[in-house]
Structure formats: structure tokens, C-alpha cells
Image (cartoon, rainbow, N blue to C red):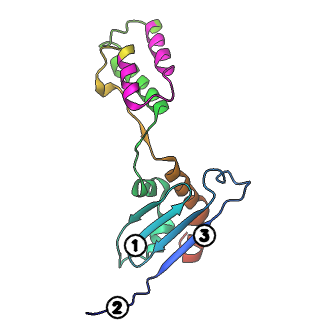
Amino acid sequence: MQIEKIEPRTITYRLSPDKEDKEYYSCMWVRYIFDCDNGRLNINSDAGDFSYGWGANVHEDFMHLMSRVGEEYLLNKLSSRAIFNVSKSKTETIKNIKKYGAEYLGINDQEQMDSVISRIRDIDENVGEEGFCQEISDILPGIEWEDMEIEKDYPYGAKVVVGMFVKYLQPKIREEFGKN
């Protein structure tokens, strides 16, 4: 039996917004833990916990990678678009109806189109994905599922901790590890 003591290269940053910071009420503390040997980022916060591993890379130091990742890229690695966004779904569905659907849906004039758009805009913001589809079907019985846009967003906590990473921590990482 071999026993090997490993002293990994890990770097931890803790961010605690001041009461005046806009993030304070969304996330009062967040800890970013960088496992540089294994290429792994662990985020623990009161807005949620997130983790992703890129794996070891002999061609680039992990902190250099972290100095250059973009917000959308990092969100996609740590989370997924799983939260139904009714507002964006309404907007995109209206665009589809205007662009592709008026004729096959039997919308014959601008007054009728305005009425359909108004009814879609009036759909409750708290409706779920299935409820949204049902309400669109009730407004436009002939609509195809492909013309209903279901837009999803990242969970709020993921957006908060990644936003804090990009705004506050990433400039510090660039400063400390020489990447601008």
C-alpha cells in the first residue's frame, strides 16, 4: 500500500458585498475555490453552490484560463438554462406569429393581429411553461408547437455569483496572474 501526501495548489477568494453594493441582498457572501492542479472551480455561497471541472491542462495555467473566461461561457459551465422565462417567451412567440403565422392562423387584418398580441402580452407572468402553451393554444387554436417559443434562463443564484466573479474577482485574478 502506497500513501502519498498531496499538497494541491488551491486558491480561495471570499467576497462579501457591503450593504451599499447592489449584490448585497442577493448574495451576502461567496467563496470561490480554484483547484489549480485539477482545473476545478467550486463556488459556495448563500445564493447557491456551483461547481465545474475543466480537467488538468499542461498548456495553460488554470488561473490564466479563469482570467479570460466570459460570463456566458462560465454560466453555461456552472449551470443550465432551466428556468422558464415567460416574458421572453411571450416576446419571441409574438415575433414568430408576426413573421410566420398570420396567414395560417387566420389573422386577416391588423386589428385582429393587435388583439392577439394584446392577449398574449396579458398572459400572467407567473404562469408555468405548460400553462403558457395552453394559453397560447386558447388564443390561437391553430398554432403549431414550433411557433410557440419557450425561452429559458439561468437560475438567479448562478447569474449572481458569476456576475460577481466577472465584475469583482476576475480583474483581481488578471492583476495577480498577469493576464489582461
Q: Nearer the viewer, residue 111 or 52?
A: 52
Q: Secondary structure at mark 1?
A: loop
Which comes before the other along the chain, label 2 or label 1?
A: 2
Between marks 1 and 3, how big is the CA–CA gap? 19 Å
Residue at 60 percent of width and 73 percent of height: 175
Circles 2 and 3: CB distance less than 8 Å?
no
Q: Is residue 34 magenta?
A: no
Main SS, magenta residues: helix
Query: Which three-letter amino acid code belongs to the residue tagged 2?
Result: Glu
Q: Which residue is mark 2?
A: 4
Quick one: which residue is furthest to the left in this view? 1
Query: Image quadrant of residue 169?
Result: bottom right
Estimate how packed mark 2 is, as few (under 14), some (14 to 19) or many (20 or more) residues with alpha carbons within 10 Å. few
Circles 1 and 3: CB distance less than 8 Å?
no
Q: Position of residue 126 (x, y in %)?
A: 50, 30
Between marks 2 and 1, how big is the CA–CA gap? 20 Å
Rendered position, 102 above or below 81: above
Q: Position of residue 156 (x, y in %)?
A: 52, 47
Q: Secondary structure at mark 2?
A: loop
Query: Which three-letter amino acid code belongs to the residue tagged 3?
Result: Lys
Query: Which three-letter amino acid code belongs to the residue tagged 1?
Result: Gly
Q: Which residue is mark 3?
A: 172
Q: Secondary structure at mark 3?
A: helix
- Disc 2 or disc 1, which is closer to the eye? 2
Which image quarter is the C terminus in?
bottom right
Which comes before the other along the chain, label 1 or label 3?
A: 1
Quick one: which residue is furthest to the bottom in this view? 2
Rendered position, 6 above or below 74: below
Q: Which residues are magenta?
A: 112-137
- Disc 2 or disc 3, which is closer to the eye? 2
Q: Position of residue 117 (x, y in %)?
A: 47, 17
Q: Which residue is mark 1?
A: 39
